[in-house]
Amino acid sequence: MRAAVESTGATSFGAFAGLHPLDGERLLAASTDGVGTKLILARARGRLRDCGADLAAHCINDVLTCGAEPLMLLDYVAANEIRLEEVAELVEGAAAVCREAGSHSSVAKRPSCRASTPRVSSTLQAPPSVSSGAQT
């Protein structure tokens, strides 16, 4: 598996974030995470905002472990049925983590297509701080 990943130019396979060389001196660190079935529990308890915060915090922390500065958070929502009020709660939670350090955020929505799963994408400027994730 390492050989396949590193054949694409990636380095540090197995780290918390993927590292891609930009030039001879700089690397771009990227991370992804998911909240998966945690959403089922959060929806039942009215805590979707916490899932958004948890997702952002995990991605930011993963990038920080590589010694990199988080630049942005890019994510999407894929579901059989998109409930915009629920997506808004997720995005608000993620944005709260980004705002904690005074960062700006922007959100881009993609309308659903008949032939594919409806998606909503968001891009948030990530703060250079560590968050502990969802609050209890």
Image: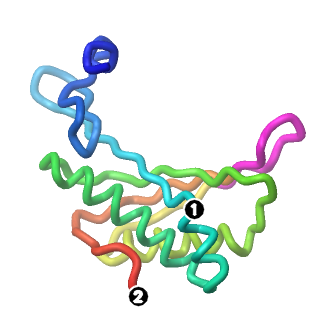
Residue 110 colored in magenta in the image? yes
Q: How far from the left and from the top, in percent, is residue 13?
A: 23, 29
Vertical arrangement, residue 10 with respect to residue 32, above or below: above
Locate residue 54, reporting x and y percent.
41, 69
Amino acid type assigned to the residue bearing label 2 in the image: Thr
Q: Quadrant of the N terminus?
A: top left
Q: Which mark lies nearer to you, 2 or 1?
A: 1
Q: Amino acid at mark 1?
A: Thr
In whole angstroms, how far apart are the C-alphas of marks 2 and 1? 17 Å
For this rendering, which residue is in front, 56 or 28? 56
Q: Secondary structure at mark 2?
A: loop
Q: Residue at x 28, y 74 (%)?
A: 132
In the picture of the structure, the residue carrying the numbered disc 1 is 37
Determine whether label 2 and label 1 are within 8 Å by CB. no
* Quadrant the C terminus occupies: bottom left
Which disc, if any, is residue 83? Answer: none
8 displayed left or right of 95: left
Q: Main secondary structure of the magenta part?
A: loop
* Magenta-tinted stretch: 109-119
In the structure shown, which secondary structural element does the residue marked by tag 1 occupy?
loop
In the image, residue 105 sits, relative to residue 14, either above or below, namely below
The correct choice, above or below, for 119 with respect to 130 in the image is above
Residue at 73 percent of width and 75 percent of height? 85
Q: Residue at x 50, y 71 (%)?
A: 51
Direction from residue 20 to residue 134 in the image, left or right = right
Q: Coloring scheme of the render?
A: rainbow
**Dot 2 crowding, Cα within 10 Å, few <14, some 14–19, many 20+:** few
> Which percent across, then down, holds residue 31?
35, 45
Look at mark 2 in the image and give the residue it sits on. Answer: 136
Residue 44 vs residue 115, the one in the foreground: 44
